[in-house]
Image (cartoon, rainbow, N blue to C red):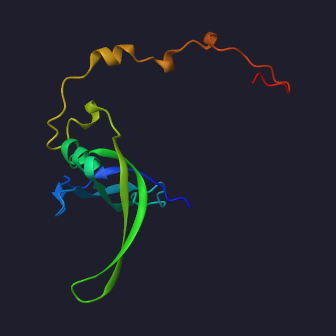
Amino acid sequence: MLNVAVLMGRLVADPELRHTPNDISVTSFTLAVDRSYVKAGAERQADFIDVVAWRSTADFVCKYFHKGQLVAVQGSIQTRTYTDKEGNKRKAFEVVADNVHFAESKRDSTGTQGSNYHSKPDTALEQSAPAYASGDTGDFEEIPLDDDLPF
């Protein structure tokens, strides 16, 4: 069986860290994920996906992520049933996060509310990054178009 979910979206609120009675860290948050298509003449729609993170992942999310940040989540889909206040049976779908990643550069997210972990840009990293767009095509070798591939 395969149950893998990969999402990228913006946090709709600051995540809040909670603890179970056994002192296990947990947080729940919602990602606004844009749909990949737009109907002609309409605005782009978004889906709001509930995510839960446990233990060190929950600690990491609550420490470094804030409302409005672009976040990438890798995990699995989980369903659960519950009874609401009116006695109706409900089913909830959520993603249980295994990994949560920054999905934008520090420069792109400096305008987000409460982002106190940002510092000056790492100019050493920027200088060492290769510039592929300005590369010379002479750096590549042409592969003959016969049926014998070199690998």
Where, quadrant-wise, is the N terminus in this rendering? Answer: bottom right
Q: Nearer the viewer, residue 5 or 141?
A: 5
Q: Residue furthest bottom?
A: 87
The residue drawn where x is 34% and y is 18% is 126
Vertical relation: 135 (above or below) 146: above
Vertical relation: 52 (above or below) 124: below
Q: Nearer the viewer, residue 151 or 109?
A: 151
Vertical relation: 136 (above or below) 22: above
Q: Where residue 98 appears, x then y in whole percent?
A: 37, 50
Q: Nearer the viewer, residue 76 or 22?
A: 22
The residue drawn where x is 32% and y is 59% is 51
Q: Residue furthest top?
A: 138
Q: Residue furthest right?
A: 147
47 to the left or right of 28: right
Q: Where residue 142 appears, x then y in whole percent?
A: 73, 16
Vertical relation: 86 (above or below) 118: below
Q: Where residue 21 appears, x then y in whole percent?
A: 16, 64
The residue drawn where x is 46% and y is 17% is 131
**In which quarter of the view is residue 28 placed?**
bottom left
Q: Where residue 66 appears, x then y in whole percent?
A: 21, 46
Where, quadrant-wise, is the C terminus in this rendering? Answer: top right
The residue drawn where x is 35% and y is 50% is 9
136 to the left or right of 59: right
Total residue callouts: 0
